[in-house]
Image (tube, rainbow, N blue to C red):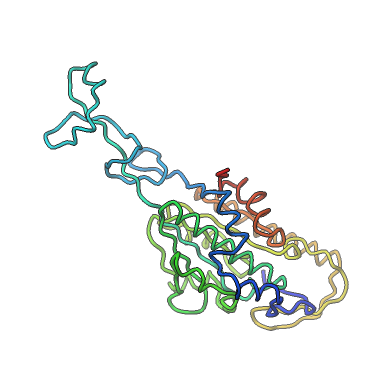
Amino acid sequence: MKPWVDEEVPSASWPVCFLGKISLMSLRHDTEVQQNLACYSLALPFVPTSGRSGELLGRGTGSSLEFQEYRTYQLGDDIRHLDWAAYARSDHLMVRLFREEISPHVEILLDASRSMNTGDGTKARVALQLTSLLAQLCGRMSGQPRVIVAKSERPCPAYGLNQLDLLTPSIFSSVTNIDELLTDHAVTFRGKSIRIVISDFMFPHDPQSLVRRLATNASALWMIQLLTRWESHPTNLGGHRLTDVESGQEIDLYLNESVLTNYRHRLKTLQDSLRINAQRLHSKFVVAIADETLSPLCRNTLAPAGLLTSSM
């Protein structure tokens, strides 16, 4: 599926209000981002650990509050972990062991292709806000967020929490898509990380292969398909000159109901395939409409999908 835009909405034109917002206010301190930071937490996944299930827990033992099991006291054990109630019952000194907690590694793969630059700036603005929100939510949990910008550079550049303000609308200019970057090994993931992909997925790919490669060695995979309302459900009929925002190719097309019905069918087929393959790998796929803006998107889409939890 190729991203097309009506010539009446130039893909490279950013409204003055958006450019002003980026220049006058950093991405980290964006008003909408800060409002949602106060309302939500990341819904961290439960991953199997040594035959058990736990919330991002390591395989060792430590001094966290997550109880694991009892063990007979051995010389050198921390006496603060002795369970005197167990001693009273069994006449044996028992030590309470605790599962070692680890900080979550969150990697956000942000699609920087030109197709993310449609919708007169709305789609790219929400993509940047969403990236900032998810990264900062991870940071608030003492996590280590990493934003990988999927663009034509080899390897793809990565940014830490303190570098979020380097992400600007100008990044959405790549002519290379995520599938091609994965094939070229231009994207380097950490093992056992939570991977969040923000993309419109409007590029040629095999959903089964793409999801499998994104999920390999990850503790969890979340895929957020960000679309404009028109991309999700086009309605304007009549003759239009459409421009491929990535190749610049133009085509004159009469958008009658038959053409739009075929487009909606192809989009639904793509979304169903991504969703099914995600479910097979215990991953999540959600569709988000950028026109809703960040707060409704979090409330109506991401929270019900189990990506965010309310902290109010």
Residue occupying the point 17% across, 36% down: 77
Report the front residue among 279 and 70.
70
Q: With respect to residue 74, does 93 lie above or below?
A: above
Report the front residue among 178 and 95.
95
Q: Is residue 308 left or right of residue 146?
A: right
Q: Is residue 25 left or right of residue 140?
A: right
Residue occupying the point 52% across, 62% down: 210
Residue occupying the point 30% across, 37% down: 98
Q: Which image quadrant for residue 92?
A: top left
Return the x and y of residue 45 as percentages of the image width and height: 47, 46
On-image quarter of the C terminus: top right
Report the front residue among 135 and 119.
135
Return the x and y of residue 222 as percentages of the image width and height: 53, 55
Return the x and y of residue 206 as percentages of the image width and height: 57, 64
On-image quarter of the N terminus: bottom right
Report the front residue among 46 and 258.
46
Residue occupying the point 29% across, 31% down: 69
